[in-house]
Amino acid sequence: MIEAKGLTKRYGDRLAVDGISFTAKQGEIVGLLGPNGAGKTTTMRMLTGFMPPTTGSAQIAGHDIVEDSLEARRNVGYLPERVPLYPDMTVRGYVTFWAKLRGVKASKPAVDAALARFHLTDRQNQLVRHLSKGLKQRLGLAQALVHNPPVIILDEPTIGIDPQQVIEVRDAVRALGQDHTVLFSTHILSEAEQVCDRVLIINHGKIVAQGKPADLRRQLQPGSTLYVVTRGADKKKMRDLLASVPGVTHVEGSGDGFTVKANTDVRGELSTHISAAGVTLLEMRPVTTSLEDVFLELVKEG
């Protein structure tokens, strides 16, 4: 549904996007993750036809964003970071306006469906100016979906709303992934991990990693990491004991216990060695790398 090849954007001497290439398949939710200023919004503006790329190409549902721009845009629903709202319109009037702009022939049933999908039917006669930020975000999603496009592009859809509204918008994005290809940008790491099938980590205009969150964690942290708490031996003796287990590569004191890194699963060996030394094992649990750890490591390397 989305295919980008070498997308580049320059503003004078500044290189905002540097040769980005990726694909997003039908029914896939892809997160564009990166710090502010990394090039996420510029990438989305190129894909939605708001600005042409300096070099490179992209297709939306098989239509080139430059050579067949109008048809490509017909296949996209776009929610920019700042939703373009008209405060003196009613909720229904606003969505109807966008439906007509996009050439939806049967606009009334399409508007009804969009309002119902984002739980706005009971507010359809309310003025936009009287909506909360969360409701405005849902209204923005309704206008992006009113023409039922195969591709949805969302730029920071949860920015500036309260935690309950964030949950509602995330649920809506997850639901969109059942019928649409969704590309959305965020700098909130937990959000990408909770919502996305796959993430693209972007820094300084380049994709520095991409894949499923779990796969990225495994790439950064091969082998296994365990947290071990014992009783019956002093710190130095315990550290030496843990380090002597075959397969263990690093032992570090952490709180009441130790973080043990190994190049294989050493849980059985650790338990056996600890028991043989007459030491009581109080706790042994895996330590997983979060997407935040992956992100920070990759950005640091970049």
Image (spheres, rainbow, N blue to C red):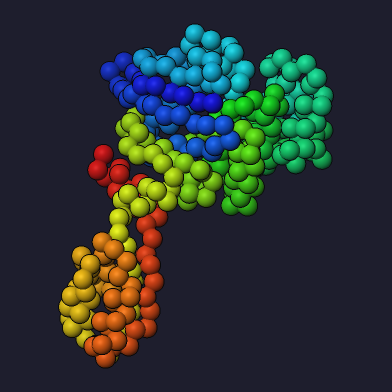
Question: Residue sitting at 36 percent across and 21 percent down?
Answer: 6
Q: Is residue 10 above or below residue 217?
A: above
Q: Is residue 30 left or right of residue 103?
A: left
What is the x, y in percent for residue 265? 32, 66
Q: Is residue 213 above or below residue 65?
A: below
What is the x, y in percent for residue 278? 26, 91
State the residue in front, 13 or 68: 68
Question: Residue sitting at 33 percent across and 23 percent down?
Answer: 19
The N terminus lies in quadrant:
top right
What is the x, y in percent for residue 203? 33, 36
State the residue in front, 271 or 184: 271
The answer, for residue 46, to whether it is visible in the render is no
What is the x, y in percent for residue 230? 31, 83
Q: Quadrant of residue 12?
A: top left
Q: Is residue 289 above or below residue 44?
A: below
State the residue in front, 117 or 150: 150
Question: Residue sitting at 37 percent across and 65 percent down?
Answer: 287
The answer, for residue 3, to whether it is visible in the render is yes
Q: Quadrant of residue 26?
A: top right
Question: Residue sitting at 68 percent across and 26 percent down?
Answer: 148
Q: Is residue 237 left or right of residue 202?
A: left
Pick out the residue farthest to the top.
Answer: 67
The C terminus lies in quadrant:
top left
Q: Is residue 240 left or right of residue 215?
A: left
